[in-house]
Structures are given as structure tokens and as C-alpha cells.
Amino acid sequence: MDTRAKFKQYGMDQPQLLPPSLDELIPEKHIVRVINELIDQLDLEAIESSYKGGGTSSYAPRMLLKLIVYAYTQKNYSGRQVAKLIRENIHYMWLSGGNRPDFRTINRFRSERLKGKIQGVFTEVLEKLIEGGYVKLEHYFLDGTKIEANANRYSFVWKKSTHNRRKQLEQKVSELFEKIEQLQAAEDAEYGDEDLEELGGDKGLDSEALQELAKRLDQILANDPEPKEAREDKKAKKLIEDELLPRLIKYEQYEAMLGDRNSCSKTDADATFMQMKEDHMRNRSLKAGYNVQVGTEGQYIVGFSVHQNASDNVTLRAHLEQLKNNLKRLPATWVADAGYGNEENYVFLESEGVEAYLKYPGFDREKQ
């Protein structure tokens, strides 16, 4: 039996008189067309002016921005993955206009050119969506997720541990100071029963006070004291400069990085150690990351914010204030899970005139 009558003609080497247009292959109302139209309406002067010009010409910022925004809507966040799709996917090919930027160009554009500007670009895109009727700011659905930072998982800095080690260091230095005071009994006439002023009384110890002590020891040694005392002073000065001072400076840097947080990473000071969502049920160890809050309407991302606190219920107010600052108004209704339900959030949303549908922890258990 002739199989040609059963099947449609198939031949991979069939030549075409005219190559197909990518535009013809993309549906009229596809989201890639919406993004293309929206970004064509944006004023990108702030981004374009960051290019100095000269040498080899650069890829068009508008084209790169279209690729990144569309990739994010498709949950593609990797520069390498986007570069791969530009060579394989007709939507990315169409947006790129035949250009083929590599992953380094894509990553450099979003990390350098978009740095400090992404929030403004996002707000402009959202305003165009509102003008076009795609988003009405009627129902706002909020949820959070943990995103792992690009940081070594073994680079922990814990606030409690840092505090305890600093206390131990302060005790060691205090003992050293007492020993020096005994060797320099002549200072009793000046200080009486008070501690050395470098210690700041009861204010605690810092690196500046320790540096002042090292200078004082230099002055003492310059006065050519007794040989035994000189040897002790030299040992004390070496101990301060080689061991105690570097350690104290390190602890001060850790405390500055921590701020109000209980943990951070040495290799990414903004990241906080928290349990990732995919690891929650597996009892995996903590990882450095961020708590990203995302709000949507009609499957469009309307608002986002990044937080250093792992708990969702303490991020709602900051998220809402950022959204209000960007849009100058708030969605009429907010919907979120029980992770956001507490009295403080209920009172705050009521004061903002927002109708909230937030369950509180234990709601389902009480209803059962």
C-alpha cells in the first residue's frame, strides 16, 4: 500500500522560496508582544546615557531590557539560559531582532546598567499596564519566597556568637590593662580609682581605645623605664597590635554588617541565613538568602520587595509602603495566606483603607 496517501508530505530538505517571518509565527495577543509594545513606550534615557560610546558598538539597551523582562515573566532568571533561548526560541529571537548577546553581556547589563534603575523601569511598565487596562489594582495577591544568595553556605556570622567572642576579648584586654596599671603604678596619682580613660569607663571597648593604648605604651617605652617593665610593655604592645586589635576590628565589622539581624554572610553582607522553601520539609541546613515578596493581579507582577527577615508577617508593611510610594495608590483588596495574619498587619491595612483577606495562624484548626 502506498503510504503517501496516509501521511502528510514530510521532507526536512524541502527548500523554501522565501524564509518564514518570525512575526507571522507569534500569536497576535501573545505576552511577548505586550512586553515589546510596553518597553517601546518607555523613556530609557537614564540607561542609555550610562554608555560612553567609542570603540565597538554596544547592544541596544531597549533590546536587552525586552529580553530580560520577558525572560522574568517566563521564570527564566539565568543569563546563560536566556542566551541559549535567544538561539532556540522564536519569541526571544523575535525580541532580539537577530542579535545574539551572550550571557556575559546579559548579566553585565542587568548588574551594571540596571543597577539602581530596575525599580523605576518596573514602575513605568506597570503604569503602562494600568493605562492599557491589563491591571486594574482591584485584587492584589501577595506571597513570599526565599531566594538563595550567591554566598558560601559556610560563611556564617552569628550575632550571638560575635557578641560572646567580643566579650571574651574585652575580658582579656581588661586583664591586660590591669597588668599594665600594676606595672605603671605612677599613673595612680593621675587616675586614682578610675579605670584608664582609653577604656571609656563603663562604655566598653572599641578598636579606637585599643589603638590609643598602643600609643600610650609607645610613650611609656620612650621614657626608658626599668628593663623588666620595658620587656612587659613591649610584650603588651605586640599582643595588642598583632592579635587583639585585628580581632576587635573584625568583630566590629561583623556587628556593623549584622545591624538588627541575628545572622549574615561574610561573602554577601546583605544576605541573611534562613531556611529555603524547597528545603523546609527535608530539615536541610540554613542558607544565605533573601525573602522576596511578590504581589500579582491577573498573572501580572504588580509589586515586589526584597527583605532580610525570613518571616513574612513582618514584611507586609514595608512591602505595602514601597508599593504605595511607586504607584501613589494601593490595590483595593489584598489577599494573602496565614503567614501574614497578625494584629499589627490587620490594624495597619485598616488604617490604609485596604480591604484585607488574611487568615491568621490557627484559623483552619479553629474552624475544624
Image: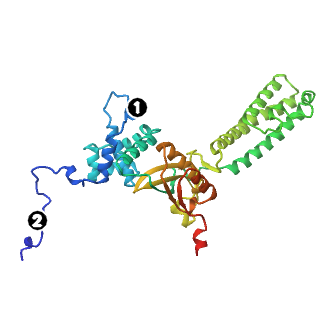
Per the rendering, the mark at residue 50 is 1
Question: In screen coordinates, is 125 left or right of 294?
Answer: left
Nearer to us in this view, 353 or 179: 353
Q: Is residue 154 visible?
A: no
Residue most toward the front? 353
Q: Is residue 38 above or below residue 147?
A: above
Q: Identify the image quadrant of residue 204.
A: top right
Q: Quadrant of residue 75?
A: bottom left
Q: Residue furthest top?
A: 223
Q: Is residue 234 left or right of residue 272?
A: right
Locate residue 169, reporting x and y percent. Answer: 76, 43
Three-letter code, disc 1 = Ser
CA distance for labels 1 and 2? 54 Å
Q: Which labelled disc corresponds to residue 9?
A: 2
* Mark 2, secondary structure of its residue: loop
Point out the frontmost of discs 1 and 2: 1
Residue at the left extreme, as displayed: 2
Q: Residue at x 73, y 44 (%)?
A: 166
Left of 263 or right of it: where is 34? left
Q: Secondary structure at mark 1?
A: loop
